[in-house]
Image (cartoon, rainbow, N blue to C red):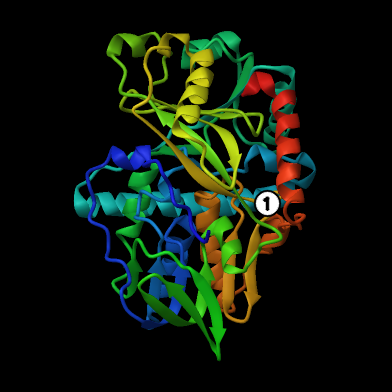
Amino acid sequence: MSHPNYQLDCGWNALLAPRVPRPALQQDLDTDVAIIGAGWTGIAAARRWQELSPGDSVTLLDSSEIGEGNPGRNSGFLLSIALAEDANPSQLERMALCNRLTGDTMAQIMADVERYCAQTGETVDLQRTGTYRAAASSAGLRSLNNYRAFLQAAGLPFTELDRNALRERLGSNFYAEGLYSPDCYLAQPAAVIRALAAQLSKDTQLFENTPALEITRVGQRWRVKTPGGHVSCRQLILANNAFAKDLGIGGSRLVAMYTFAGLTPPLAAAQLDALGTDANWGLLPTHRLGSTLRRTVDGRFMIRSMHSYEKELPRAHIETELARRLNSRFPSLRQTGFDKVWGGAVGFTYNGGALWGEVKPNLHISAGCNGGGTVKGTLLGRLLVDKAHGLDVPDVPRLFGRASWMPPEPLRVIGFKFASTLESWQGRHEL
């Protein structure tokens, strides 16, 4: 399928006031530039194209609605330094440039959100809170030690925390050791992507509930088929992550992995008082199959965990497993339950590298976020447009990696099941 067809509503979007979506495409249309995917990457690309070529018409297509699709389904971490998977002290020069680019991009996002709030009078939850990483077992501690070594070598600030300090701050006795880094923002992701989409140029046409079904080359132009019409364009940008493979691009390098989240109701003040001194925090796991946690400004807890290959899991299974993992960390929440549970697709590549650049004449792609598609996706969307305009850009494959080849099906799914089973066993105390 060329787009996700989610069965469960996005919990973050459900907390916001209803929004009237832009109409779906119901005609044939000619445009200078078409962008498939109105997420972090697609919106950044659209805005950058209008900055560099203000006379061009830009058409943005999204299979869902702003806030309800993938960009609103993440955990709301906007990191301004490298992820732990990139933490290699032997490549500090490369990582320093990555961090500088990422930090500048985060500053742009913050400025855009502040501008939106000033123009509308609305409040968008986006705060520089920092983030925790914590380990519960020897497997997690090995990863935590690697990340500590990177932070030390890079001269980045952090605080080391033992079990008692973590329990005091977060209210959980689950973790043996952790690190706190100030270089992270926490957000209500559906609210932020709505704010960014609202600032698209008037010369950018946005069509929601308009999935791209097929792309073909017709003469010197690209043609995008949708349920209600066709879009003909000079330049085509794919910003739909793993689903680009179902349009014929990146099939040997991309796969859609689904992860799942649950959001509790707001807790009573007495409950919150017993759950640590930090009122707004986020925790990233040291094991890549571990659980991500949030305590939100309105007193809710969120947990994101579990993985499935190319499709959503049943709601009952999601709720049961997420509740088990949350309760192991916070036994006092055993009777709380979830207001919302949902899934989201992550563009996954075998080696963590990106599929990025011009892959066919006037066909550009940025895909393979590997779970880091907010700030990094925004950066790569802007750089993709710079490159399409012939501007000097950093060497993205060197900085962020180049997506490697994956075996075809059924070997791919067999390999995923074997690897995930093995990793789940090795990191079972971190799940």
Could you say where residue 338 lies in the image, as x and y percent from the top left? 37, 25
Write the residue at 20% across / 52% down: 120
Q: Is residue 368 above or below residue 25?
A: above
Q: Residues within 10 Å of mark 1 (few under 14, many from 20)?
A: many
**Which residue was labeled with disc 1?**
349
Write the residue at 22% across / 56% down: 20
Q: Is residue 280 left or right of residue 361?
A: left
Q: Is residue 249 left or right of residue 13?
A: right
Numbered disc 1: secondary structure:
loop
392 or 16: nearer the viewer? 16
Q: In this rendering, does residue 150 appear at all?
A: yes
Q: Hey, what amino acid is under mark 1?
A: Thr
118 or 233: nearer the viewer? 233
Write the residue at 61% across / 54% down: 368
116 or 364: nearer the viewer? 364
Could you say where residue 238 lies in the image, as x and y percent from the top left? 53, 67
422 or 333: nearer the viewer? 422
Q: In this rendering, does residue 303 appear at all?
A: no
Residue 179 picture quarter? top right
Residue 204 picture quarter? bottom left
Could you say where residue 273 lies in the image, as x and y percent from the top left? 35, 10
Could you say where residue 357 lies in the image, as x and y percent from the top left? 63, 69
